[in-house]
Image: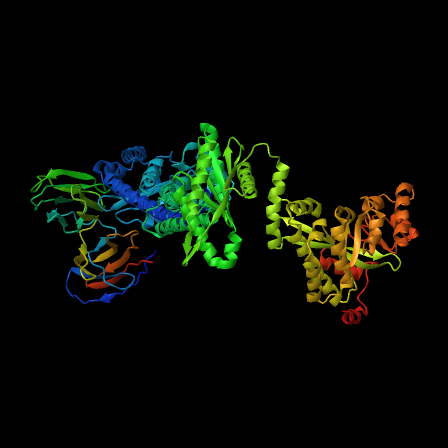
Amino acid sequence: MRRRSFQARLLSLMVFALVLFEVATLIAVHVAGRRDLRQTLADELRVGGRVLNRILGVRGRQLTDAARVSAADFAFREAIASADRSTITSALANLGARVDGHAVFLISLEGSVEADTLGGHLVGRPFPVPSLVTGAGSQGGTTIVTLDHRPLQFVVVPVLAPQPIAWVGIGFTIDEAVLEDISRLTGLELSLWAANPAAPPVLLSTLPPEKQLALRERIRDKAAMPETLELGSDTYQTLLQPIETGDGSAVHVLLQRSLEEAQGPLRRLELQIFALSSVALLLAIVAAIFFARGVTSPLSRLAEAAQRIGRGDYSTPVGVTQDDEMGQLAAAFNRMGTEIGAREEQIRHQGSHDSLTGLPNRRLFLEHLALWIASAKRRETRVGMVMMDLDRFKEINDTLGHSLGDDLLVEIGKRLRQTIRESDTVARLGGDEFAVMFETAAAASAVELAQRIGRALETPFTLGGISIDVKASMGIALYPLHAEDAGTLMRRADIAMYQAKRDHGAYALYESGRDDHSLRRLAIISELRQAVATNALELHFQPKIDIATERAVHAEALVRWRHPVHGMLPPDEFIPLAEQSGDIGIITKWVLRRAIEDCAAWNRAGFDLAVAVNLSALDLYDAGLPALIGALLHDQGLHPSKLILEITESAIMKDAAHALKTLLDVEARGITLAIDDFGTGYSSLAHLKRLPVDELKIDKSFVVNLSGETMDDGVIVRSTIDLGHNMGLKVVAEGLETSEAYAILKGFGCDMAQGYFISVPVPSPQLLAWMDESQWGARPSGSWQRSEHEP
Amino acid sequence: MRPVLALLLLAAARPGAAATTLIVELRDAKGAPVTNAVVYAVPRGKRPPPPSRRAVLDQRNRMFVPHVLPIQTGTAVTFPNNDNVRHQVYSFSSAKKFQLPLYAGTPAEPVVFDKPGVVTIGCSIHDQMSAYLVVVDTPYFALTAGGRAELPGLPEGAYDVRVWYAGMRHEPAPQPITLANEPRSLTFQIGKK
């Protein structure tokens, strides 16, 4: 498209320029030619007029000579001298016949007509053209006269005996042959006539008959003869010229030249110019096409090359070998392709390989695994993979330094590569995780490979003069035995690896039928530890308001996990798992640290807020926890009264004796304790009474449905509030979602409320914004000094 | 066209002679002398004597010699051809129409001019040849030379003096003169307009 348009533009430009030039030339030739033609024709006509005069003159002289010779005939003279009228007349007629004269007169020396061949009616009268007789010498004279409305060439010669005794006058018709002669000589059309006011003139003309008729009409119209005359279908340039006559009669000659005919040579010239122009145009077009091809063909090849480069084909060079700018551009293209290819290869390598060990990374491994599985599917073979994770690598890193840790990973990569077959693939998936992919006939051979890897790692690594023992856990999964696709196969190898870790074995084969939920839990637990370490957990806070003052007094810290795959996870999704795996401790400690930090920040900013943190039942077994909390509070300069620890009813009831010990320790440090989810367990009131608890939180399942209609929940809530009050505890309602429920709770005398009706859990900065803006918010007026003095 | 005639009579005493001489001066309108004109005196009332001699119109070098030849009526004229080419002499003049067919030498018979008048002679072979035979009824004639003609031997008596010249269109009026025994002169002025 582009090529066509460039070619077309170039073509149209050239064609336009040429056509312009040619049209200008043609117009110039045409105009100049026509102007010159007019001038030339005018000249030709004038010349024609002179030729006519000249020829008539010559003819007159010739006729005179002929007449003189004839009149010198002895017998003629004798006859004239005879004085016999009839003899004389017949001699005149004979003379007329000899010289082809139209009329012959005998004129006396005195100038009167003696005899004539026209019937003698002029005899005795003076000759009508006396000047001719008087002007004629011995050689005779000639002029043109009009006789009977016809122009005649009249000749007068003397009759010598041997002295002049008389004159003979002969009138010669000017016939068309004369005009034809002149016409042939000059190339003009001639028409000659004597003016006749009474009738259309007798026309002598070289024109074709029908045009003569038209011309006669024009002459009769007495219109002045125009310079350009149209007769019939032809246009003529004309010149009307009077002819000198001896008798004063008006004789005209009209000289004409057909414009059509005269333009012939000009037309031919114009045609030749046009033909030459056309040939030039054609040549120019051909040249333009060639030229445009010379430009566009390399251009389109370059465009194709650019598209190839776009597609990622850097190896096919541009086939432009011209020794000009195009060639330079093509060479630059080729260099560019090669260099982009090299860089892309490098980037691709970086993207698909681990920079530390040079092994393929997780992405490339997964890609290859998918390819292998696809190929195995076609060939009905098997693919196995081993996922491996080093035990205690974090310890090694922490004690020996990251640099050495990295060196160790490199060495492990080398050993793995040495251990496996050339056709197998080893990759570093990240951290201390490696994976091997191999073609295998059976599970047994996979196990054998794992064992071989295990043996390879038994030899201690010596790095920086330090000998390091490494132990790894490996999980094995096989296609198609354990999974149909690469992702699943990897996950199952991962699960098998955790199984191996759990069993403290070197490797484990994935066990078919292990339910995915537990697998996910296992995976999540391992990821959770990572999340704590990398601060992937977030704290959100939900305010509690004091119903009496309608001001926020506490904010409950709720942990969220921003999972890279599953997104934002609520605590229900992972806290129970953490409790099961025994990892809850690290989460609790992380939450405590962050909550105390944030609360301290609020108070420093002037917000009089306490923070509530949930403890797990398992946390109560941690005897060191109270001391840790004390230390955290101290570090942040937060008064213990600003911390509320919430423990579920069930947690306390599980091992009340053990829990009590921890709780007492906590209470002794001035920290407030609250029973969470109250009403769902089977609290023993006796126990409850002994616990150092300050608050009861009614489970949200009772509060959510609280309304004027469902009185059951209302009864429970009301009696619970009463119970709490009777035991000297403050009562908090959780799950408050409606203003109706809020009014009921207020009516019941509930101390505090928490729920979506007040605010959803929000991160710390939004909580402070909420404090500023909400009707429940407590603006930080004057609270600064107080918080400053209290610790 | 009437010629103005001025007559000047000069008496020239010529005692004892029976005849006298008339001298005529011929002038044109401008007063220039006219040459080769014929001046002749025709006696009144009596017949002149008949011609006594022959005249000759010679042809030499394709010319008639003389160009003007006055003769008395009845004179026989011979036309000798002295050229080595032949001539054919003719005249269409009414005074004498004749033709001498192509000849060399002298024709045997002379031509007798028996009527007065001017006879224009030509040669039909050579157009340029022409001569005038002026035939007059008197033996007293002469050609002017330098505008002057002398008519000798005129007997006493009355005469009409007349003039002819080539190209003359109207004859000037005759000049009457009576001659006594003494020479006379008179002047003719021939006029052109």
Question: What is the number of callouts on the image?
Answer: 0
> Nearest the camera: A361 or A108?
A361
Is the image coloured rainbow, by chain, by secondary structure, or in one colour? rainbow
Instruction: Please indicate, yes or no, whether residue A143 appears anywhere in the rendered image.
Output: yes
Q: Quadrant of residue B89?
A: top left
Q: Please state the horizontal and vertical placement of residue A647, each as a whole percent of the image.
A: 76, 51
Instruction: Please indicate, yes or no, whether residue A188 appears anywhere in the rendered image.
Output: no
Q: Is residue A487 above or below residue A325?
A: above
Position of the C terminus of chain A by quadrant: bottom right
* Position of residue B94 in the picture relative to residue A24 (left or right): left
Q: Please state the horizontal and vertical placement of residue A48, each as a whole percent of the image.
A: 35, 46
> Nearest the camera: A510 or A505?
A505
Q: Quadrant of residue A234?
A: top left
Q: Please state the horizontal and vertical placement of residue B99, each as a whole percent of the image.
A: 17, 38
* Position of residue A535 in the picture relative to residue A484 (left or right): right
Q: Is residue A427 above or below residue A611?
A: above
Q: Quadrant of residue A774?
A: bottom right
> Nearest the camera: A243 or B169?
A243
Q: Residue furthest front?
A: A657
Measuring 64% from the left and 38% from the top, which residue is drawn there?
A517
Q: Please state the horizontal and vertical placement of residue A288, each as a whole percent of the image.
A: 38, 45
> Nearest the camera: B17 or B174?
B174
Measuring 23% from the left and 37% from the top, which residue is drawn there?
A78
